[in-house]
Amino acid sequence: MNEGKRGRAVRYLLVILVMFFIIAPFYWIYSSSLKVSTEIVAQSPTLFPESITFGHYANLLSSSDYPIYLTNSAIVSFATMVITVVLSTSAAYGLYRLPFPGRKTIYRLILLAYIFPGSLLLIPLYVMLSRLNLLDTQLALVIINVTFAAPFSVWLLKAFFASIPFELEEAASLDGASWLQTLLLVVLPLASPGVASVAIFAFITSWTEYMFASVLIISDANRTLPVGLAGIIGQYVIDWGLLLAGAGATTLPIILLFVLIGRFFVNGLLEGGVKA
Amino acid sequence: MGIFLVAPLVIWLVATIAYPIFSLIRLSFLDVGVIGTGGEFVGLDNYQRVLNSRAFWPSMGRSVVWVLGNGLLQTVLAFVAALVLNLPFRGRALARTWVILPWIVPAVVAVIVWKWMLGTSGGVVNMILLRLGLIQEQVGFFSTGNTAMASLVGINSWRFFPLLTIIILAGMQGIPKDRYDAAGVDGASAWQRFINITIPGLKPVLFVMGLVGTLWSVNIFDVIYLVTGGGPSRATLTMPVLIYDMAFLQYRLGRAAAAAVLMAVAVTIFTVAFIYFLAPGSEEEDEEWG
Amino acid sequence: MFSKYPRTLLAFLLVAILAFALAPAQAQDAVEIVIWHMEQPPQRVERVQGLIDEFNAANPGIVVSQDVQSWGEIYTKAPASVVAGNAPDILFAIPDFTPIIRELGAVQAVDDFVAEIDETHGYLDVGIEPYTSDGQVWAIPLWNMAHAIWYNVDDLEEAGIEEPTTWDEWASAVEALTGEGRYGIGLPANRNLYTDQVVYNFMINAGASALYNDDGSLRFNNEQTVRALDFYSQLSQYSPPDSPSWAWGEAEVCLGSGTCAMVNQFAFLRSYEANGGDPANLGVMPMPVDEGVEDPGTISYVNAAMILTDDAAKQEAAYEFLRFIFQPENYGLFLNMEPGLFLPITESGFESESYWSDPLVVKYREQLETVLDYSRSGRLFGFTGGQTFPSIARISAQNLLSQVGQLVVVDGMGATEAAEEGEYLMMEAIE
């Protein structure tokens, strides 16, 4: 009994430690962003704000195009998500359910998309996209983001597709269902937790992408949130209050989104389990 | 049939990756300086110069340190977090969802907050360490080569270990319960169960995460560049930073391309070896797949 | 009484219809000018937009628009955009950025226009030199930026220290101001432009401002450079431990929070004010000078506009916009998009009412007068001695000066050895 109590205390202590490591920096962003500037730059930082002001956020909203960046990020991430889901579920179905020669090689080659450093692909991609007249468009970002989100998504889906009994499909085809009907009506519903996870994975990958968004987008009206945030930093002078408010405001929408859908991402993966 | 379903993705990847890689390889044989200027064919000259330069091998070495450091730290953090979050406690579902938080914020945010927290004028980490008496005077985390590398590995690991945690947790759910039950009957200790059941059960997951995670982390550029720019004194100048340097700061695009190709060759060798030696149960897989 | 309304209404309608009929025609004929600049902070963008709007309204034949870029990416983005054929018509520049774009053959010579502005408004000598190369001028100087030593007046008074003028005085002042969580000076040792600038200030005031001999060979490794590096590492002992990761902002915070007694910086009035700084406590002085140095001074960055378009009509429209900016009633507004940081580069700007009437400028007038005076002794590495060598772009893009600074501060290398190593790195960069 005593042993159990101590075990429980240790357990909760461990959980608190892990979560502290995760959450403390976020607390620091938000609490600091509410302090007045003099308190932010004070020599010994205060753990709890002694002054509360929303001035930095007001400043952020009035002086930058935050709503535009937010909308752009949402559009790009959403489009990336949809295309990634379509391409990767289709590919996963083909790879894991419909055997064909050489598919293992293809499966591995897909993961190798991550071999080359993105910073060097940047130049040829810039030239290529400009020839296609896609520079400074959100489509360009979607194209790139899908490239970096899809390969891992295909792997994430493997466990879900591989665990569905083949008998179900056989039964479906005996009933005269086409492959498309089988995919949409039999396989996908069973793999839906996996598809949800992939969707969220693609969304986040796109949401956090910085390098391509900073170079391929030229005008302010098409900028995404991370690039807009970097713009606040500026050369020579830093307004720490504005910067921290920017960091907080950049993070907030995704946190809110996760309040709504976060559990699908995690539960999806946990339910399916992951296999290689 | 299957091949037609894979085709769209493959075509997409070929268009966005194969073409740039092709033009990169072409570039590595030309003496192009500033992007957009022309260049003449110089054979292997770029490769020779890169291999003979003082910067190349140290950067390769730093990339190895970077990958190993990240791999080790992220694996340890992720296992600790996964094991803890696999214990029964109240609010477990909530904790499992929010453990992912660092991974969903853009690198720029992580960089801002960590640089701010690790600084010495008003940095909270230094303040806490001082108050706890762990240090006597403020530490400049980015001031020496080793601490800068370690701090960057820490920042980057903080961002990526949550994803790994979730994947490992997911892998744990896939290990049949009865294996643990059987071990419980045999009186195996928690550690023995971890070594004999959990780890082998996770092998396939760890294999893919080891592979993809390595490829991801070896190419990390933004966090390093935004915090130290490769310094102090080149201590964090890993390959991607060096390549960016060559291309956009030294204006030697041809040589940068050669360095990128060399790096890609090294990564490919690693990948092939990794798959060849560590691919789990590939025969079994072959049978399963026919 | 009754007939008056219809007539006014009629006139109004007529004007409206005319305006509608003419507007599309004008828009079609209008010359469009796209400007790229790297002044990202929101209030700067807003100020520039205000001037653009005013100009566009006054010049129906020209439509100017701005796209704001960042210094972080412009070195990648600008060349790529030239290659892709979507480069802007006007691109803002700092001296070492111009040679890069010139290599692409995209920069227009602007000798005549610069001569015109010089005649009307009187450029400072430091303005045109950094943009002159191969006997021609490649960009139109827009504003100056100059460093000075900024300090907390209280700290010096408490310690009973006068403004030091020699290096010996400076060293003992810095030492005396250091203690218990306080640092006598904040000196960066990062690999970035800020550290380049501060290291170069030490070089100037040790008598090592020239990086090149007249024949274009390097003269970095010399006695004066060694002296500068040695002194840099000496003072760095009294700088906060995180200074190897500093950029400009950290120095501002260090001074503003009272952690540092002094820093070497541009005039950062806006953030000083935002962080609750007290004007009376903000001291500014020229950097102290090493014994026997005859030509002391500060680093100065002259920012300029390059004309990239080769279309004659567009060029003329671009000039028209720049003429507008240089008008004394506009120029001060333009500079005060960042009060203090951006200093006039023309004599008429020095005197303009629009410059001196900004509230922050009024509040910190005394400090600014010191800085403005000091800015006349400004110079930039690689652009001294009346001729420039394009290879400087490679030296500064790689931040080689700050890399050498790191060698003495972070790696503890001796100054002699570091100067040798620095020259080697520079040779390697420009071969």
Image (cartoon, rainbow, N blue to C red):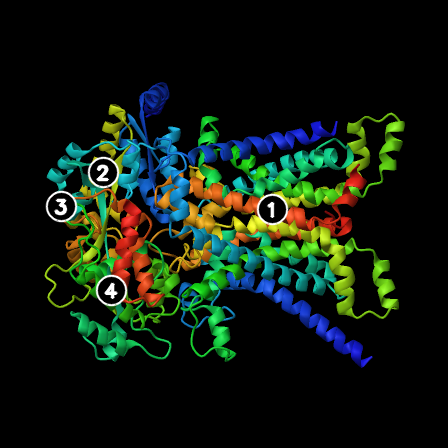
Left or right? Give the position of B13 relative to B166. Answer: left
Which residue has dot 4 on it? C416
Left or right? Give the position of B272 relative to C11. Answer: right
Asked if the residues shown at circle 4 and circle 2 are in contact, with their CB atoms under 8 angstroms apart, the answer is no
Q: In which quarter of the image is residue C223?
A: bottom left
Which numbered mark, 1 or 3, is in the foreground of this view? 1
Which residue has dot 1 on it? B271
Left or right? Give the position of B217 relative to B232. Answer: right
Q: Is residue C390 visible?
A: yes
From the top left corner, tell me how far across and down residue A92 is, in percent.
71, 37
Which residue has dot 2 on it? C139
Three-letter amino acid code at the position of disc 2: Ala
Three-letter amino acid code at the position of disc 3: Gly
- Give C337 or A73, whichever is nearer the viewer: A73
Query: Gap between marks 4 and 3, in whole Å?
Result: 28 Å
Three-letter amino acid code at the position of disc 1: Thr
Check chain identity for marks 1 and 4: say if they share one.
Answer: no
Query: Gap between marks 1 and 4, in whole Å?
Result: 45 Å
Query: Gap between marks 4 and 2, in whole Å?
Result: 37 Å
Crowd rating for badge 4 (residues with CA inside 10 Å; few <14, some 14–19, many 20+): some
Crowd rating for badge 3 (residues with CA inside 10 Å; few <14, some 14–19, many 20+): few
Q: Quadrant of residue A83?
A: top right
Residue A171, compared with residue C203, is above or below; it is above
